[in-house]
């Protein structure tokens, strides 16, 4: 298993979830999945201020996902450089992991806030329709892997 | 798709394992060890280490799959609170930290059981190309 990272997880899920031609990189997967989500939102909510606000949240979520994927890739690449060294110490691994964790935690709070805003903006019916679409993906065997 | 996007973010936000990638595929590691290490005494110890890595890998995957599923369920439920979601992600992160600690101990033992030449050969088999670029 090479370069294990959050970008791999997100990329695999999103690539599989896109109905059209599968994107070739995690960042392309995120872009394609976000475009799908924005289309879905327009069909659920239509136009207007609420739709515009929800759309803006999804765009912010896309930026967060892309940052998370890039950071995860960089951390994984740096970790591999340490891993190649036979004499690497536990402290070297742990320092890199701690820095990556701190960055993730900071981003996580932003993600939680964005999700909360979306949950407020969408009606129960709109949320349910999107969740049903997600269930269809799961029924096709598409789900996040650890 | 919107919910899938949220789940992808939160399931991924706990981070990949960020653990030794030499142990990522224990079967591949086993092959590399057998190609590079000829000393039967150390080979026996290394085989035991790979067996342990395989067992750990299987147990970890099962635990993490359950934690990922929980994060997905919480993220997908509109009524979930931020505290519930953060707690689910924290649980997943704790699982990943435990995985790292186990893998790190195995990785350090692996290094101690190989000569510099053997190590170079093993690394070359597992990481044939150095990662390039700044973006995934």
Image: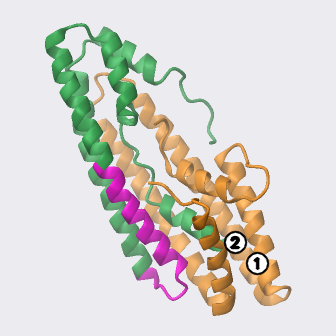
**Residue B45 pos. (x, y %):** 16, 22
Which residue: 52% across, 82% down?
A: B77
Whether the residues at callouts 1 and 2 have beta carbons within 8 Å, the answer is: yes
Disc 2: CA contacts within 10 A as few (<14), some (14-19) or many (>=20): many
Q: What is the basis of the colouring in this image? A: by chain
> Which residue is disc 2 drawn over?
A58
Q: Kindly tell me whether residue A145 is visible in this rendering.
A: yes
The chain in green? B
- The answer for how far apart the CA atoms under marks 1 and 2 are is 9 Å
Which residue: 53% across, 41% down?
A: A74
Specify the segment rendered in magenta: B59-83
In this rendering, would A9 be left or right of A27? left
Q: Colour of chain A?
A: orange
In this rendering, would A114 be left or right of B110? right
Farthest residue, direction right: A47
- Rendered view: B46 above or below A77: above
Which residue: 44% across, 24% down?
A: B126
The tally of labels here is 2
Label ID, residue A41:
1
Which residue: 77% across, 64% down?
A: A35
Q: Kindly tell me whether residue B5 is visible in this rendering.
A: no
**Residue B42 pos. (x, y %):** 17, 16
Q: Quadrant of residue A53?
A: bottom right
Disc 1: CA contacts within 10 A as few (<14), some (14-19) or many (>=20): many
- Which chain's residue wears label 2? A
Assign a secondary structure to mark 2. Answer: helix
Q: Nearer the viewer, mark 1 or mark 2?
A: 1
**Residue B53 pos. (x, y %):** 27, 37
């Amino acid at each position: 298993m090479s370069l294990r990272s959050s970008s791999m997880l997100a990329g695999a899920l999103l690539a599989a979830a896109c109905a059209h031609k599968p994107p070739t990189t995690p960042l392309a997967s995120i872009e394609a999945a976000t475009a799908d989500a924005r289309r879905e939102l327009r069909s659920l909510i239509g136009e207007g201020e609420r739709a515009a606000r929800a759309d803006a949240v999804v765009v912010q979520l896309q930026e967060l996902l892309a940052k998370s994927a890039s950071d995860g890739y960089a951390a994984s690449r740096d970790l591999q450089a340490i891993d190649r060294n036979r004499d690497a110490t536990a402290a070297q691994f742990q320092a890199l992991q701690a820095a990556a964790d701190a960055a993730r935690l900071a981003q996580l709070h932003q993600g939680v806030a964005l999700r909360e805003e979306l949950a407020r903006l969408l009606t129960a019916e709109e949320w349910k329709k999107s969740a049903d679409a997600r269930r269809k993906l799961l029924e096709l065997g598409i789900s996040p892997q650890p | 798709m919107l919910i899938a996007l949220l789940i992808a973010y939160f399931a991924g936000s706990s981070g990949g394992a960020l653990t030794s990638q030499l142990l990522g595929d224990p079967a591949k590691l086993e092959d590399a060890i057998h190609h590079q290490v000829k000393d039967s005494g150390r080979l026996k110890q290394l085989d035991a280490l790979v067996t342990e890595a395989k067992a750990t890998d299987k147990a970890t995957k099962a635990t993490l799959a359950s934690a990922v599923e929980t994060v997905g369920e919480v993220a997908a439920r509109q009524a979930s609170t931020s505290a519930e979601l953060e707690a689910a992600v924290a649980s997943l992160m704790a699982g990943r930290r435990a995985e790292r600690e186990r893998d790190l101990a195995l990785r350090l033992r692996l290094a101690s059981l190989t000569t510099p030449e053997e190590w170079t050969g093993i690394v070359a088999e597992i990481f044939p190309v150095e990662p390039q670029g700044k973006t995934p």
